[in-house]
Image (cartoon, grey):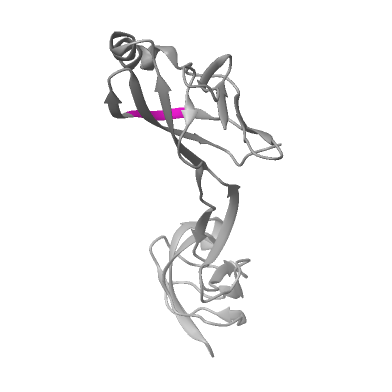
Amino acid sequence: MTVTVGAYSLCDGTLAGGVAVSDLRVNQRRIADIVPVLPKSYRISLGSAGTGYVVEDELAITGVGGEAIIQVSAIGAAGAIVNFRVVFNTFNQDEGSLSASGGTGIGATFNVSSATQPNASSPIAYNRNNRPCVYAFTVKRTHQDADAAELFIVGLEDAIPSAGAITVTTTGPVEATFTIPNGKVQSHDLIQEQGATTFHSYSIIGGPPTT
């Protein structure tokens, strides 16, 4: 197997240029967000504005499927309700138009209807189609001598490009070449140094391989 980052070779299949001494290991994760789906809710809207109301009047509406307390927050001419806020709401079904009781005015009605929201009891896994992959392998290099091996170890971080197309070519009866989209060498670790020979493990992160 050979692996290149741009023009730089992590292993080229030769003793001096690096031989992959372990099988390529690939860890691929499928990313999905767990999206909670809220139960259906019921909203209250103003039907008839009525007359004679004042700000902070508290009104009550009652239906078959629940009840609500409404507080007047703004009025217009003749005490007609312009705006309000819901203090309490237990409705669990559509009710249509309901007359309000309480407060200083008369004639206000409110509509109870289901909000435009999906109804489900279980969360949904939403697939983001993100599939980060981690590629790992070990490379053996035989250097000219022990000094050259130590210089290689010290300079490896600066030698590996921070960006560039990563290409992997497999060896065997039938060679196959693939690229790692948005690939980056995320780590390299010295496993062992034996005189002029070094063993490094590499980890590359990127997208699913493309041929």
The majority secondary structure of the magenta stretch comes to strand
Q: What's the residue at 54%, 68% (across, down)?
A: 51
Q: Place residue 187 in its image quadrant.
A: top left
Q: Measured along the vertical axis of the image, is residue 209 above or below residue 116?
A: above
Q: Quadrant of the C terminus?
A: top right
Q: How many marks?
A: 0
Q: Place residue 148 in its image quadrant.
A: top left
- Residue 38, percent across and down? 51, 68
Quick check: can you spot residue 26? yes
Front residue of 171 and 120: 171
Front residue of 22 and 83: 22
Front residue of 138 and 38: 138
Q: What's the residue at 38%, 10% (across, down)?
A: 144
Left or right of residue 104: residue 35: right
Q: Measured along the vertical axis of the image, is residue 168 above or below residue 95?
A: above
Q: What's the residue at 61%, 32% (across, down)?
A: 181
Quick check: can you spot residue 50? no
- Residue 136, percent across and down? 45, 38
- Residue 26, percent across and down? 51, 45
Q: Measured along the vertical axis of the image, is residue 159 above or below residue 110?
A: above
Q: Place residue 7 in its image quadrant.
A: top right
Q: Quadrant of the N terminus?
A: top right
Left or right of residue 18: residue 170: right
Left or right of residue 36: residue 180: right
- Residue 74, percent across and down? 47, 56
Instruction: Report if residue 175 lies within the magenta region.
Output: no
| Bounds of the magenta segment | 185-189
